[in-house]
Image (spheres, helix red, strand yellow):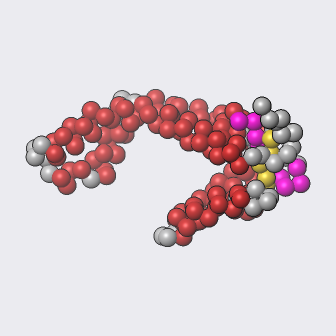
């Protein structure tokens, strides 16, 4: 087994990918009760359209959204989402980590190695990072370019550069 990187050294690209994947899987798990609870309504909606009992026009986004929000799993999903937000905010504020980063053993710090504030991580790495998505075509281009920049020697994605942060071994 290769030696583990020393705390404070740059996190490996694979570790960052694993942490991001774990964070996304946790969010998927949080949303599952709402999705599963809406399945009977969605199956009936799709089945009716396929069987000719409903108009294909009834398969609009709002019908599916109503089935999801009106389902019994919505309360569980909302409570789980609130818990996820509290846990994530606490981890980011105290140690610069999301749940995935904590599980993988990496954290966000300033480029000089000092602690990154919650505001810097939340506002600059996340909110500002999401703004390009509001612009047609710019958003998908930004989402393509941002992670590709991790292949620089500094291992900084565009959102890291914007926030003046790096990701290191915890």
Name the image quarter holding residue 42: top left
Name the image quarter holding residue 66: top left
Give the image location of residue 109, x and y in percent.
81, 48
Q: Is residue 119 magenta?
A: no
Q: Is residue 109 magenta?
A: yes
Q: Residue at x 31, y 34 (%)?
A: 39
**Is residue 57 depicted above or below 77 in this figure?**
below
On-image quarter of the N terminus: top right
Q: Which residue is drawn at 30% across and 45% down?
A: 64
Q: What stretch is highlighted in magenta?
A: 104-113
Q: Residue 43: in sight, yes or no?
A: yes
Give the image location of residue 145, x and y in percent.
62, 64
Q: Does 146 sit left or right of 43 as displayed?
A: right
Residue 110 vs residue 143, the one in the foreground = 143
On-image quarter of the C terminus: top right
Residue 54 vs residue 74, the one in the foreground = 54
Give the image location of residue 45, x and y in percent.
22, 42
Name the image quarter holding residue 152: bottom right
């Amino acid at each position: 087994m290769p030696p583990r990187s020393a705390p404070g050294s740059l996190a490996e690209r694979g570790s960052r990918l694993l942490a991001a994947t774990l964070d996304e899987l946790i969010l998927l798990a949080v949303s599952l009760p709402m999705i599963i609870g809406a399945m009977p309504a969605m199956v009936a909606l799709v089945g009716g359209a396929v069987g000719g009992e409903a108009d294909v026009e009834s398969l609009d986004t709002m019908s599916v959204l109503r089935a999801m929000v009106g389902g019994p799993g919505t309360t569980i999903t909302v409570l789980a989402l609130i818990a996820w937000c509290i846990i994530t905010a606490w981890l980011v504020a105290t140690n610069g980590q999301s749940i995935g980063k904590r599980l993988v053993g990496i954290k966000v710090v300033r480029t000089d190695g000092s602690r990154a504030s919650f505001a810097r991580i939340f506002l600059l790495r996340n909110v500002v990072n999401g703004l390009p998505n509001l612009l047609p075509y710019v958003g998908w281009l930004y989402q393509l370019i941002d992670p590709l920049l991790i292949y620089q020697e500094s291992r900084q994605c565009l959102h890291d550069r914007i926030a003046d942060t790096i990701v290191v071994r915890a």
